[in-house]
Image: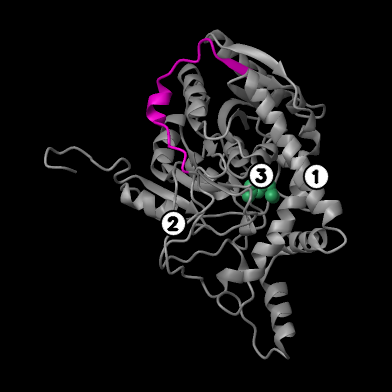
Amino acid sequence: MDASGKFVLPLSGIPYLAKDVFCEKGVPTTACSNLLRDKDYLPPFDSTTTKRLKAAGAISFGKANTDEFTMGASTETSCFGVTHNPWDTDRVAGGSSGGSAAAVSADECLFALGTDTGGSIRQPASFCSCTGIKVSYGRTSRFGVMSMASSLDTIGTLAKTVEDAALILQVIAGQDPLDGTTSPAPVSDYSAALLKPVKGMKVGLPKEYFIEGMNPEVEKAVREAAKVYESLGATIVDVSMPHTKYAIATYYVIVPSEVSSNMSRYDGIRYGHTVSHPENLLDYYERVRSEGFGPEVKRRIMIGTYALSAGYYDAYYRKAQKVRTLVKQDFEEAFENVDVLLSPVAPTPAFKIGAHTGDPLQMYLEDVFTCPINLSGMCGLAIPCGFSSENLPIGMQLIGPQFREDLLFQFGHAFQKETDWHGRKPGL
Ligand code: GLN
């Protein structure tokens, strides 16, 4: 507070939770993995994001649950156990930022930090009825956040409203000398964007995001949302993004490849789980990693090591990178004709705990509408747009060109001024 009694810090006194992959000096940070939980890894430094939030007056008061090393779509692979959905505690909260989404939805905090590599902010936001912003690659710093797939990881937030998300992103966005992949592009004034009307603007509905087999209630809710924009004077345009169908396969080659390389630092020597009486160095590594990592992390290390190995690199990794470029071109072409795209976040509302645990492929399909945005580096905003007949939240996704988070906030806020989905509370 300054001498006149005015708050000068933009987030003064606002309590938040950080997903358990954000390093905070001296605070146990485990990625919800036994590998780091065993000895409670205490980071000797702060992530850029938590440092910026602290400087803005926000108060971090704990860590939020995540799938182990953020690999998952249900927050069921955490070594601390499953996060339950506040709207129906028999169901998952989504993942991997499920702890963040459940906490925001259940009023345990005003916002929570998350990471999004293929959908991990947007899908749990959708399952728990929160607002979640996945920024363009390079808009926020990844420094001090445990990596999963470095060319796709992004840092963002889950909040109660678009307005709150805009205020928080204003604090954490921008170039960071500690992360060479952050962009020097100036950060827009997000609060100013909230005030702009959407009249005369164009919203694209990509036909490949309304697929056979998706839940009809989800489709209906998103199409109703398009009508809200129409009523506000925007034009709805049908668009086609033909390479969408390759996105999941591409993502699940690139991500495990980068995972296999990022996970190699967890060798039990510098920090984390250790074992006693190893026979030799190889035995030490094998036991540390087989005891420390859970099945999903091991699966990705194995797939990634295979995809990157000599003889397979061209057939898998290089091919996947080429298809990634085609997916990105779909977005670039679409944004020549429309301002934003509108789609569902996930094909279904929250599923039952355990429903997909024995079937990794089914779990991977959760990312069908979200991972193309990560592959292309664009930005996406998940906001509540309805409820199913079982009273489960349904989310929609606004997708914008790189570094146009301001457009997403403009469209998102316009929607939240017209609807009250985001104001509903779970009956806990
Ligand atoms: N569900 C996706 C995966 O398992 C996304 C995870 C994420 O965005 N961190 O890779």
User: What is the number of the mark on residue 62?
Assistant: 2
- Position in image of residue 183 (x %, y %): 50, 44
Give the extent of the magenta segment. Answer: 184-203
Q: From this view, report whether residue 282 is shown above or below residue 219.
A: below
Depth check: give the residue in front, 87 or 300.
Answer: 300
* Rendered view: 375 above or below 196: below
Q: Quadrant of residue 324?
A: top right
Tell me the SS state at disc 2.
Answer: strand
Of the numbered discs 2 and 1, the one sitting upstream in the chain is 2
Spot occupied by residue 372 in the image (x, y as percentages of width and height): 70, 37
**Quick one: SS at disc 3?**
loop
Label the magenta part by its dominant secondary structure: loop
In terms of sequence position, does the residue under pointer 2 or pointer 3 come before the other? 2
What residue is shown with label 1? 249
Can you identify the residue that label 3 sits on? Answer: 118
Provide residue 164's location: percent of width, then percent of height: 41, 34
Q: Tell whether label 1 touches label 2 (CB within 8 Å).
A: no
Q: Closer to the observer: label 2 or label 3?
A: 3
CA neighbours of label 1 inside 10 A, class few (<14), some (14 to 19), many (20+)? some
Residue placed most toward the observer, 208 or 356: 208
Which of the two labelled residues, at mark 3 and mark 1, occupies the earlier sequence position?
Answer: 3
Select label 2 or label 1 by which is in front.
1
Q: Amino acid at mark 3?
A: Gly
